[in-house]
Amino acid sequence: MPLLDDILKRKRIEIRAERDTMPLEQLSIAAASLPPTRDFVSALTAESSHRTRVIAEIKRRSPSGGLIREPCDVPALAGELEHAGAVALSCLTDTADFGGRITDIERIRQVVKVPILRKDFLIDPWQIWQSRYAGADAVLLIAEALPGNALEDMTHLAHELGLATLVELHQKEHLDRCQSIVTTSPEKALLGINNRDLTTMQTDVQQTIRLVTSIHSPSRLVSESGINCIDDIDALSHHGVHILLIGEFLMRQPSPGTALGDLLAGQASP
């Protein structure tokens, strides 16, 4: 099973090949004529109540979970999840380990009105331009994959291009720099805690709960990965976390939309 370091090594090779196919200059010219992005942050934070808001994720497989959903009718799933109550969608675009495609974003955009998060291992500015060109409204930036000033630089470029950012960490050591980005860009950035340890691929929803007392604004926090039942949702809600990214659980259900509707309907009253 590939771990983060292995994935990043592969990703660097892929980026070099993709840049040869579509140089940055070509991407930037094409991106300049695109319509404005949809407001990812407002979609997730505008709700005044303490009811849960879900970013529903579409993915075909994962390194830890193997094959998840095949065949995978991406546009149909996107429409189903939006109709069931997802306020945003996440699209896995990594091909080698997740079976995704960058073209999935445009296919989703054609059938939904909610904003779309590109979820991938973004480590090069070229990928930010590519995300904008592909039709994403927001991008995931992983602190563990972006050392030094790279996280801040990638965030700044994304915001310049009109993309929101979900700034993600797993280990507490990255919390200060992630929170600093979110604090200085409240209209464009949200903080994410990945409950999956990317060095082992093990998942524990308690990771969010362990870190939440150190979060300046839990109402702007996204808990990601490993959320599989109403008890998980209620436990996170009890600690003030009301924005969740849920993917694998939904994708394994016969009807992901029905499963999402049941989760949202089954929450404890705020």
Image (tube, rainbow, N blue to C red):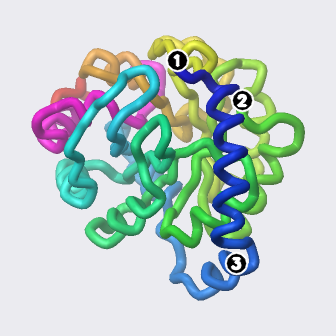
- Determine whether 18 is above or below 57 in the image: below
Task: Label 3: state its secondary structure.
Answer: helix
Task: Label 1: state its secondary structure.
Answer: loop
What mark, if any, has residue 201 been given in the picture? 1
Membership of 264 in magenta stretch:
yes
Q: Quadrant of the C terminus?
A: top left
Q: Nearer the viewer, mark 3 or mark 2?
A: 3
Residue located farthest toward the bottom when viewing the structure as drawn: 33
Residue type, numbered disc 2: Glu
Closer to the chain start, of discs 2 and 1, is 2
Residues at circles 2 and 1 in contact by the CB criterion of under 8 Å: no
Q: Residue at x 16, y 31 (%)?
A: 253
Q: Which residue is mark 2?
A: 144
- Determine whether 21 is above or below 200 in the image: below
* 265 on left or right of 236: left
Residue type, numbered disc 3: Ser
